[in-house]
Image: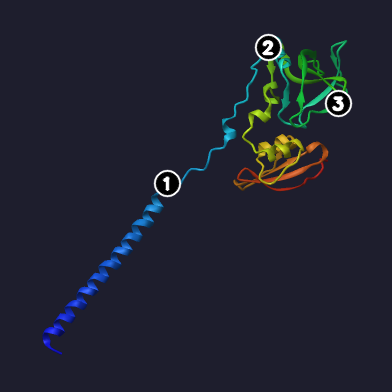
Amino acid sequence: MAPDLKRNIQIALAIAIVVAGVRAGWILYSRHRSNQSQQTKPQAAPPLNADYYVTPKKLHAYDLKSAKDLARQPVWVKEGYRYTFYPYNPITHKTDFAHETGLLLPLQRIEIKDVVFDASPDKKGKQVMAVFDQEGKTFAVPVGTLQESNFKLYADEMLFIQDPKELYKHWPPEVWESIEKHEVKPGMSELQTDFAIGMGVPQNSGDADLKTVNYPNGGRPLTVTYQNGRALAIKPGSPAS
């Protein structure tokens, strides 16, 4: 082979090797920059829970007269199976505290007729009683207290004065269907479960992502385990001893 031809071939090979090396280096550099970009790119924030923006109206009553505003519209029970109600005599205006009638139900709709004072069973101060009719009979449920001049109404913690279905209208129809049937389905939030089966009692847990709550459920106890705020497992609970 002629010396000039041999030298030209060597030069061409050297150039090809350099070009290949530069190309390979550029590919590696581009991949490295791409990986860095993906790692440093801020992750999209999870969607905000629309429930956080729901602000139910409150009465902020400060005396008996302002508490009577409870009778101006229907009310709904926030936590079922928590509040005891009693027979009430509309003639004597007395509550029969000696005989418990039952517990208000989850999201029970009540038409309050009046809000009155009645003597506390322990003879200490007075009870603020919300009077309502149910199945042709009159009952009363405590919604506050009067100790000397200290008037305290806790109806705002007990009752919605707006239709919860309107307040939480962003919930899917199937969720409201389960609530109305007093059923719990996987994927329901803890608030939705409360609306369906009433108050719950949390268990102690060392896992921040898991939460287990026991629900008396009117004598049909259920235990619900939540993961990241959503019902994961639902099983029969243990009857209260």
Q: Which residue is drawn at 68% across and 13% down?
A: 150
Q: Which of 119 and 165 is in front in this view?
A: 165
10 Å crowding of disc 2: few (<14), some (14-19), many (20+): few
The residue that disc 2 covers is: 66
Q: Nearer the viewer, residue 114 or 150?
A: 114
* C-alpha separation, residue under disc 1 versus residue under disc 3: 57 Å
Counting residues from the start of the chain, the first of labels 1 and 3 encountered is: 1
Identify the amino acid type marked 2. Ser
* C-alpha separation, residue under disc 1 versus residue under disc 2: 51 Å
Residue 156 at what x, y percent from top left?
A: 67, 22
What colouring does the structure picture have? rainbow
> Are the residues flagged by discs 2 and 3 in contact, CB closer than 8 Å?
no
Q: Which residue is drawn at 64% across and 36% down?
A: 171
> Are the residues flagged by discs 1 and 3 in contact, CB closer than 8 Å?
no
Identify the amino acid type marked 3. Thr
Where is the C terminus found, in terms of image quarters?
top right
Identify the amino acid type marked 1. Pro
Residue 80: which quarter of the image? top right
The residue that disc 1 covers is: 42
Residue 22 at what x, y percent from top left?
A: 25, 67
Residue 79 at what x, y percent from top left?
A: 72, 31
